[in-house]
Amino acid sequence: MKKAQRHEIIKELLMQNTIRTQEELLQLLKMKGINATQATISRDLNDLQIVKITNEAGEKQFALFNEADNRSEDEDNHHFQQMIHEMVTKVDRVQFMTIVHTLADNAQMISALIDEMDLPEKVATLAGFDTLVIISKDEADAQKITDLLQSYLF
């Protein structure tokens, strides 16, 4: 099966089911006749920008990061705030850089989210596994970003 087909099936499964673990996703894929490894599923989740969120019952589950491409600006801002609140654990500033610590394997997704928000104080982002760096032109711009992100943590 091609990657694109598997991605479509994964998105479909996420919309139809509450999936809490990669193992649950693997089992659902097997029921559809798709054999994949955990490593493949992990890469697919990253490619599709699938994140873990806390549902209304207080349980963690997988969800599509960009569930709705037709969100209003207010909805985008709310989504941005929610993702920062749920995924970011700490925000610090070092000179002209903002250092953002995330839950494991979420730094790249948060970096992409910050890039999409097109913050004027941001020059670039650099993401690893659980840490990302936001580079600004100067300390004042870095402080604005730091203050913004910290305000969403609580």
Image: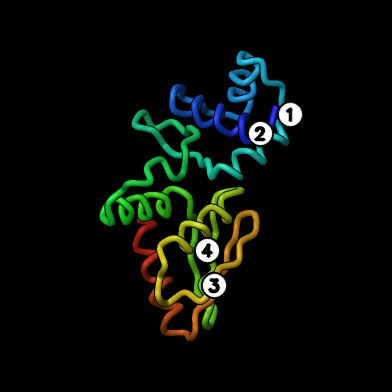
Mark 4 or 3: in front is 3
Query: Badge 3: how crowded within 10 Å, few (<14), some, or many (20+)?
Result: some
Badge number at residue 67: none
Q: Secondary structure at mark 4?
A: strand
Q: How far is mark 3 from mark 1, CA to CA?
A: 34 Å
Image marks 1 and 2: residues in contact by CB distance under 8 Å = yes
Query: Badge 2: how crowded within 10 Å, few (<14), some, or many (20+)?
Result: some
Q: Quadrant of the C terminus?
A: bottom left
Q: Which residue is mark 4?
A: 100
Q: How far is mark 1 from mark 2, CA to CA?
A: 6 Å
Mark 1 or 4: in front is 1
- The vertical placement of 124 against 18, above or below, is below
Mark 2 or 4: in front is 2
Q: Position of residue 136 (x, y in %)?
A: 50, 79
Residue at (49% x, 27% y) in the render? 12
- The vertical placement of 55 against 103, above or below, is above
Q: Which residue is mark 1?
A: 37
Image marks 3 and 1: residues in contact by CB distance under 8 Å = no
Camera-side residue: 129 or 13? 13
Instruction: Choose the circle earlier in sequence order: 2 or 4.
Output: 2
Camera-side residue: 115 or 18? 115
Badge number at residue 41: 2
Camera-side residue: 32 or 142? 32
Three-letter residue code for mark 2:
Ile
Q: Position of residue 86 (x, y in %)?
A: 43, 48
Quarter residue 141 falls in? bottom left
Residue at (55% x, 59% y) in the render? 101
Tell me if 117 is positioned left or right of 89 in this view: left
